[in-house]
Amino acid sequence: IIIITVSTDLPPSQRRWCGNAGVDKVVTVSDHMATDFGLKYGCLMAERRWLRRAVFVVGPDDVVRYAAYMPKLGDQPDYDAVLAAARAALPA
């Protein structure tokens, strides 16, 4: 399983956050310039140019198997549901 975090933060800010939080097993991607990911996946809050928190589980066939959008900025996903979807997406 590969965990990719996409945000509109600049790469130096992403690295700083990962370092401060002790996160070293996550790939970070910046959507700062074109907000292409945010537009395509329905995460862009255009008025603030932020990405809404969301979780996507993509199978090895590149098909989205699970998607959840958090209704408010501070909300956390249902991690049990995310992990179950990730396990279900793994090849047998």
Image: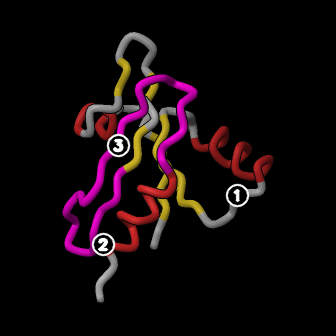
Circle 1 or circle 2, nearest the eye: 2
Quadrant containing the C terminus in the rendered view: bottom left
Does the segment drawn in magenta span residue 24? no
Local packing at callout 2 (Cα closer than 10 Å; few below 14, some 14-19, many 20+) is some
- Mark 1 to mark 2: distance in Å? 24 Å
Left or right of 19 in this view: 44: left
Which amino acid, mark 3?
Ala
Mark 1 vs mark 2: which is more N-terminal? 1
Q: Which mark is residue 10?
A: none
Mark 2 vs mark 3: which is more N-terminal? 3
Give the magenta range. Answer: 56-78
> What secondary structure is marked by label 1?
loop
Q: Identify which residue is drawn at 30% across, 72% down.
A: 89
Q: Are marks 1 and 3 in contact (CB under 8 Å)?
A: no
| Farthest residue, direction bottom | 92
Q: Which residue is mark 2?
A: 89
Q: Which mark is residue 68?
A: 3
Which amino acid, mark 2?
Ala
Q: What is the x, y in percent for residue 48?
A: 45, 14
